Structure formats: structure tokens, C-alpha cells
Amino acid sequence: MASAEQRVRELGLEIPDYADPPYGRRYGRLKPFHRIGDLLELSGLTPENRAGERLHPGVVGVDVTVAQGYQAARLTAIHTLGMIRLALGSLDNVVGLSRALCFVACPPGFEPLHEVSNGATDLFVEVFGDEIGSVGRASIGATALSRRNCFELWLSLECAPEPTAS
């Protein structure tokens, strides 16, 4: 299989650059990611572009269809790839995805949370392949998310060891 960076090019994905402007300017002080050895923890990402425009804001099952929620989750995963590049320099430095916490804005009793979250995790398999891109996942219903986003993703992953100084 092609490398993750090659797959991104083949798929024609437009991955945002989180280095400029800096991440977090609309949400206050926060740390976009934290690396502990070979573990990378990403802060929450949403289907909101660098200019603050949101894809399908609102509540899934009320204002947003499940199909639109899927597309929002997919876009969030693309944004996550941009944060991984910021943290690691290249998507090819990802060894394996570990955990995806998927938050879906929805009303009480909404059950097809997994159908929305599939938008993110399907994208990861497309980019990284089954072995690296398959991830443990929880889909959690939330009554509200920041700025009326319909989806938010927290991702943990294993990355290649940092080069040692010689």
C-alpha cells in the first residue's frame, strides 16, 4: 500500500495547515497536542475550517441529517490529519491509531451515533490502511458542542520514535 502522504495526494484531500495561523484562536488558551514518548494525544477538533466556517452546524437528528453528520465527521478527520502533520511533520510518522472519542451533538435517545462517527474512522482507513488506520472508538452523544458544531473528535495515536541527538 502507498504511504499515508501518497494516499492523501491520491484521494485529493485538502489538509489544513495548523502552523499558521496558530490553532485555538477562537477557543482560548489550549494545547493542540501533547506527546509522551511514542504516544500523541490530540486536542478536540471539529468540522470547522481555519476561517471559522462550520460544516453542518447544529444538532444531528434535528438540524443535521445523519448523512450530513457523516460528512462533518469526515471533514473533522481531515482536519485531524493537519494536526498530526503539525505534531509529527508527516503522516508517514503514524505507527497506529489508538483511540477515537467521537462526540455527536444530538437529542436524547438518538441512537445512530456510530453512523456519524464512521465518517471519521472510514477516512482514517482510506488514508492509513486497515492495519494503521483501524482505531478503537467510542461515540458519545452530547447535548451541545462549542460553536454549535455537530461533531468533535479527540484522537490518540502511536507515532514513530523521535530521532535521537547524536
Image (cartoon, helix red, strand yellow):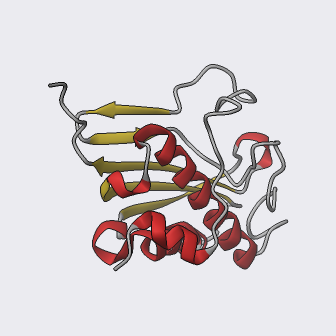
Q: How many marks?
A: 0
Residue 137, picture quadrant? bottom left
Query: Quick check: can you spot residue 115?
Result: no
In the displayed structure, does residue 101 sit left or right of residue 164?
A: right
Residue shown at the point (64%, 69%) measured from the top left: 110
Judging depth in this view, the residue of 15 and 74 nearest the camera is 15
The extreme left residue here reads: 166
User: Residue 8's spot in the image, x, y percent?
Assistant: 53, 68
User: Residue 18's spot in the image, x, y percent?
Assistant: 62, 39
User: Residue 37's spot in the image, x, y percent?
Assistant: 23, 34
Q: Is residue 53 above or below residue 104?
A: above
Residue shown at the point (49%, 46%) measured from the top left: 85
Judging depth in this view, the residue of 161 and 52 nearest the camera is 161
Residue 146, picture quadrant? top right
User: Residue 34's spot in the image, x, y percent?
Assistant: 40, 31
Q: Is residue 10 above or below residue 21?
A: below
Residue 151, picture quadrant? bottom right
The N terminus lies in which quarter of the figure?
Answer: bottom left
The C terminus lies in which quarter of the figure?
Answer: top left
In the displayed structure, does residue 135 sit left or right of residue 146?
A: left
Judging depth in this view, the residue of 49 and 111 nearest the camera is 49
Query: Quick check: can you spot residue 82?
Result: yes
In the displayed structure, does residue 16 sit left or right of residue 153?
A: right
In the displayed structure, does residue 72 sit left or right of residue 154?
A: right
The extreme top residue here reads: 29
Residue shown at the point (84%, 49%) measured from the top left: 53
Q: Is residue 42 above or below residue 3?
A: above
Judging depth in this view, the residue of 116 and 76 nearest the camera is 76
